[in-house]
Amino acid sequence: MNKALTDEQLAAWRRDGFLYPFPLLSEAERQECLDGLARFEGWLGSRVNESRDLKWRTMPHITLPWAHKMATDPRILDVVEDLIGPDIIIYTSTFFIKESNTPTMAAWHQDTTYWGLETPIDMVTAWVALSEAGPEAGCMEVLPFANGKPHQYRHRANVVKNSVNRAAQVIIDPLDESRVEAMALKAGEFSLHHGQCVHRSGPNTAGHRRIGMGFHYLPAWAKPVGKYRTAGMLVRGEDRWGYLEPLSPPRAELEADAIAAHEMAVTRYRETYLEQEPLHEKMAG
């Protein structure tokens, strides 16, 4: 298979831990996703980010065919394969929505901190902008890898006010912010970042709703180390290891089997998070 990324892009990924922007959705495809989001919020009876049960922010690829379609889009998976190999599992996915002129933000953090996976964790997040996500709208800001390689920092959970992240976490080790870069995206574009890429985002001071979706991919050999067997969905290649509870694609929007699978997956994911949170505050920096 021909590589989707150039040698220069692969070198930048290994050195920095992020790449952007990549084109993805046509205007018709983007509208299809926004229509799907509107149907989902109609079913919820509220906006996703304002739902009383925050479980609906996570893992929409299990219950919503349009989200699964985006998660398995070859234009995303081809570049992910270049980074983590041909056997790809989507571990989780998340709506990252900030209403216009609101204080919602994310403090400096790393995605895989509380996932309870054996290191090294070779994870890729594809962050898709369903609306414009520039600096005014609170786009993601990233720091290149310190010393050109991934490093796990200590985090403290449940301390960040108005956090877009459910764990409300922040890195408590010192960071060199002299090389911060804003990953601005146009509507329909996506970015990539490594699971140990340090990133944050500011509040949305723009006049439009900032709608993003993150899809988090693991190589199928990634192994849980906690006491819970978390779930994952194979989206390319083979799973010869069987470490994660397998999930099936949704057959229809919010059908009963998919909702049950979602409940199982979200519960185990959250239990693992709660198990891991205190460990990373105490770990060596």
Image: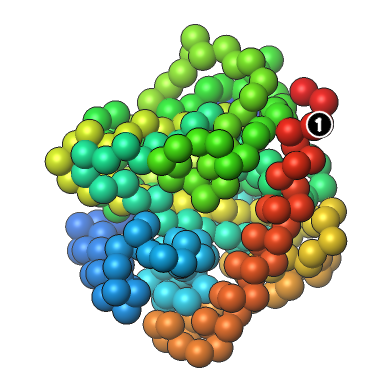
In the orientation shown, which residue stands out farthest toward the bottom?
Answer: 256
| Residue that appears at 48% across and 56% down | 94
Q: Give the total number of marks visible in the rendering.
A: 1
Q: Position of residue 144 (x, y in %)?
A: 56, 22
Residue at the disc numbered 1 = 283
Q: Position of residue 146 (x, y in %)?
A: 65, 18
**Front in this rendered view, residue 21 or 56:** 56
Q: Position of residue 218 (x, y in %)?
A: 66, 54
Q: Position of residue 105 (x, y in %)?
A: 40, 37
In the orientation shown, which residue stands out farthest toward the left?
Answer: 207
Instruction: Please say if 166 is above or below 32.
Output: above
| Residue that appears at 49% across and 41% down | 192
Secondary structure at badge 1 equals: loop
Crowding at dot 1, Cα within 10 Å, few <14 / some 14-19 / many 20+, comes out as few
**Front in this rendered view, residue 45 or 121:** 45
Quadrant of the image containing the N terminus:
bottom right
Instruction: Please say if 209 is above or below 51.
Output: above
Q: Is residue 194 visible?
A: no
Q: Quadrant of residue 51?
A: bottom left
| Residue that appears at 70% across and 28% down | 153
- From the viewer's perspective, tell me whether residue 263 is left or right of residue 102: right
**Front in this rendered view, residue 8 or 30:** 30
For the residue marked with disc 1, what is the amino acid? Met
